[in-house]
Image: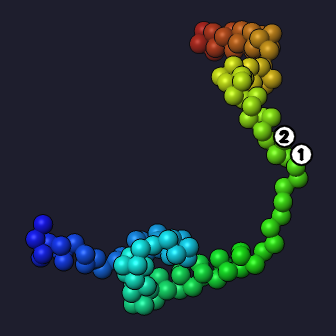
Amino acid sequence: MTLIHRKLSDVDPRMNHREARALFLALADDELPAPKAQAVRTHLDGCDDCRKGWEGYAYTLQRLKGVEREKAPPALATQVMNRVRRQRRFGLRGLHTTHMHYRVPVEILIPLLLGAAVAAFLFMAAP
């Protein structure tokens, strides 16, 4: 790779709105490499829409960091893990038998289908 190609690959083209907004989370967490973070900040300096979006995003993050964290009750974790283990154990058999609770009995379907067939025959046979 020549020196010219190396210099051209280091220069980022102007960032568009979608790219800048997609990097908001990484920018807030300081996970972007320095050149990429600088490119986002340069875009924010020149774009009012994205700057307003960033200000709203940063404000929301700041508010969320101030919210007190709640801890789930210990029984909840136990219940969730029991359900996960049960589903792993039964796998597709568990899904296969789930429909049994919501199935319509055949004894109801047979008279309904027979009545519909007779009504259709009478309707087609009428002059």
**Is 31 situated left or right of 116 in this image?**
left
- Give the mark count: 2
Residue identifier under label 2: 79
Give the camera-side residue of 108 and 60.
60
Residue type, numbered disc 2: Gln
Other residues around mark 1 within 10 Å, as few (<14) / some (14–19) / many (≥20): few
Give the camera-side residue of 127 and 53.
53
Other residues around mark 2 within 10 Å, as few (<14) / some (14–19) / many (≥20): few
**Is 88 situated left or right of 32 in this image?**
right
The answer to whether residue 71 is above or below residue 100 is below
Q: Position of residue 36 (x, y in %)?
A: 38, 76
Q: Where is residue 72 in the image (x, y as percent from the top left)?
A: 84, 55
Say whether marks 1 and 2 touch (CB < 8 Å).
yes
Asked which quadrant contains residue 15, the reply is bottom left
Quadrant that contains the C terminus: top right
Judged from the image, the secondary structure of the residue bearing numbered disc 1 is helix
